[in-house]
Image (cartoon, helix red, strand yellow):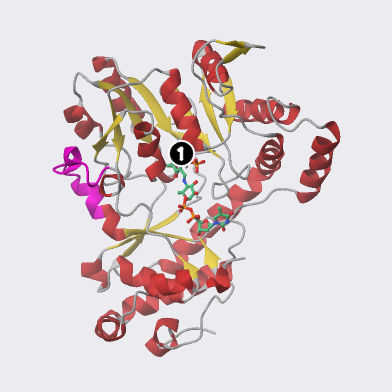
């Protein structure tokens, strides 16, 4: 049923639009017959992890898809980042955007490396090389860029800066599988790039990740690092960890990779459907992808200018949540405002104006193979209704406002 007046909104007593809920990050799942067949094979052969045949096949397929020399499959993106830092022997300080998922910063901190938070470019939302330049100190060992939501960092300026100061470069490419930058596939930039194949990514291996590099020596070191440092049976060469992917994850990854064209197509169609359905809503702008590169369109990110829309981002998110649309305020409030950074005196006076502006304005909407065009139309209609009636909504919300986000989260009907 189309919602036409404020009273139709669930927050104000109307019927919920999506009783079955719509989630950001709903997994895209590949061919089930393939999965079942190969799961049986894994069980029959009784080889479950530790460089099994499916892991090797997954790595080969990934390397070939990306056109990189080496791909090492790992248990998740966070451990992959940490292994990347260890392989490069990073220490001291690493420059990293605050506007990212907290795993990017935590992976540094977990290794005793100080994340030095950098602002982002207001257009691409990726690390601002000019600000990065100001943050370089004698302790800086690397720049860690994030290809946020699949849009590539300014790799050319970062490369130049790193060369001038003899810094290593790592890219967190967890959002950027199947994307390109200046005509080059993501995966080829910096010393190495790190992907995530978490359930919420464009394709997944349940949990999983990979490091890709064109550097032979680094690849060799990463392979040792992910397996406790074993260089031979009973022979440990240095401090390693258990970062291995397992066979079950590898077949999930293989199934996802085979279905990737289908996932990319669904995402692109959803993006275009959102674009059409949201057009003309004042103060609400869909994040753009230019035509010159490949994107996975896996993130539907909206920017709310409250001065024009008449309502703020949080109001729209609360009203959508009440409708069963689990929109997310990625990446609020920014890593520097999260623990352990926020209360650490060394982070007290940092100024990241672009990051701080974006964290109050952006939010993500559901997409992927679980979302259909009718869903998109309904979500956009709800947003349009909110903005068209912003004045009255603001008045009523102040009277009726409950913490809607919390209410919905503790409502367990959506779990399972
Ligand atoms: N770098 C960047 C830039 C990243 O974005 C990430 C991860 C990493 C590094 C680290 O990579 P991994 O170590 O995770 O491989 C989720 C994911 O857990 C996380 O992987 C992802 N980024 C991040 C952006 O999103 P949360 O805290 O938002 O997760 P959660 O549990 O709230 O779920 C997100 C949404 O997905 C919900 O709407 C529910 C839905 N969902 C989730 C799962 C797991 C499903 O529908 N089904 C599922 O199975 O972090």
Residue 280 visible in rendering: no
Q: Which of 297 and 275 is in front in this view?
A: 297
Residue 274 vertical placement versus 256 (above, below): below
Q: In this view, does 34 lie to the left or right of 103?
A: right
Which region of the structure is painted magenta? 341-357
Disc 1 element: loop
Which quarter of the figure is the C terminus placed in? Answer: bottom right
Residue located farthest toward the front when viewing the structure as drawn: 234
Residue 352 position in % (x across, y down):
20, 44
Residue 188 position in % (x across, y down):
48, 25
Residue 118 vertical placement versus 387 (above, below): above
Residue 381 position in % (x across, y down):
45, 76
Q: Mark 1 points at which residue?
A: 293
Disc 1 residue crowd, few under 14, some 14–19, many 20+, Cα 10 Å: some
Name the residue: 69% across, 38% down.
254
Name the residue: 63% across, 42% down.
205
Residue located farthest toward the right when viewing the structure as drawn: 44
Q: How many marks?
A: 1
């Amino acid at each position: 049923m189309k919602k036409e007046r404020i009273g139709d909104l669930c927050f104000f007593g109307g019927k919920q639009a999506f009783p079955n809920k719509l989630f950001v990050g709903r997994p895209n799942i590949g061919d089930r017959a393939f999965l079942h067949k190969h799961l049986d094979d894994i069980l029959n052969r009784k080889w479950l992890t530790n460089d099994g045949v499916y892991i090797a096949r997954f790595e080969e397929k990934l390397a070939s898809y990306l056109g990189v020399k080496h791909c090492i499959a790992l248990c998740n993106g966070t451990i992959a980042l940490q292994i990347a830092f260890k392989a490069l022997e990073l220490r001291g300080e690493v420059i990293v955007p605050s506007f990212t998922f907290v795993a990017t910063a935590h992976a540094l901190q977990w290794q005793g490396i100080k994340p030095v938070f950098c602002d982002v470019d207001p257009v691409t939302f990726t690390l601002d090389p000019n600000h990065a330049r100001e943050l370089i100190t004698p302790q800086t060992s690397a720049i860690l860029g994030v290809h946020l939501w699949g849009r590539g960092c300014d790799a050319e300026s970062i490369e130049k800066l790193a060369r001038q100061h003899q810094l290593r470069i790592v890219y967190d490419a967890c959002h950027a599988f199947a994307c390109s930058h200046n005509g080059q596939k993501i995966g080829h930039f910096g010393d190495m790039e790190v992907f995530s194949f978490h359930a919420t990514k464009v394709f997944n291996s349940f949990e999983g990740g990979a490091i890709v590099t064109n550097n032979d020596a680094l690849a060799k070191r990463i392979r040792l690092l992910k397996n406790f440092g074993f260089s031979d049976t009973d022979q440990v060469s240095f401090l390693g960890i258990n970062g291995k992917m397992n066979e079950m994850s590898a077949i999930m990854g293989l199934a996802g990779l085979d279905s990737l064209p289908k996932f990319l197509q669904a995402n692109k169609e959803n993006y275009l459907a959102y674009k059409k359905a949201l057009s003309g809503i004042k103060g609400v702008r869909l994040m753009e992808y230019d035509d010159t590169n490949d994107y996975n369109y896996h993130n539907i990110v909206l920017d709310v200018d409250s001065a024009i829309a008449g309502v703020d981002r949080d109001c729209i998110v609360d009203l959508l949540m009440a409708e069963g649309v689990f929109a997310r305020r990625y990446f609020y409030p920014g890593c520097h405002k999260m623990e352990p950074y926020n209360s650490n005196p060394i982070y007290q006076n940092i100024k990241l104006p672009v990051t701080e502006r974006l964290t109050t304005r952006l939010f993500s909407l559901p997409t992927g193979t679980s979302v259909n065009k009718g869903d998109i139309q309904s979500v956009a209609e709800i947003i349009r209704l909110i903005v068209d009636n912003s004045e009255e909504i603001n008045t009523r919300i102040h009277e009726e406002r409950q913490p809607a986000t919390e209410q919905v989260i503790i409502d367990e009907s959506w779990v399972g």
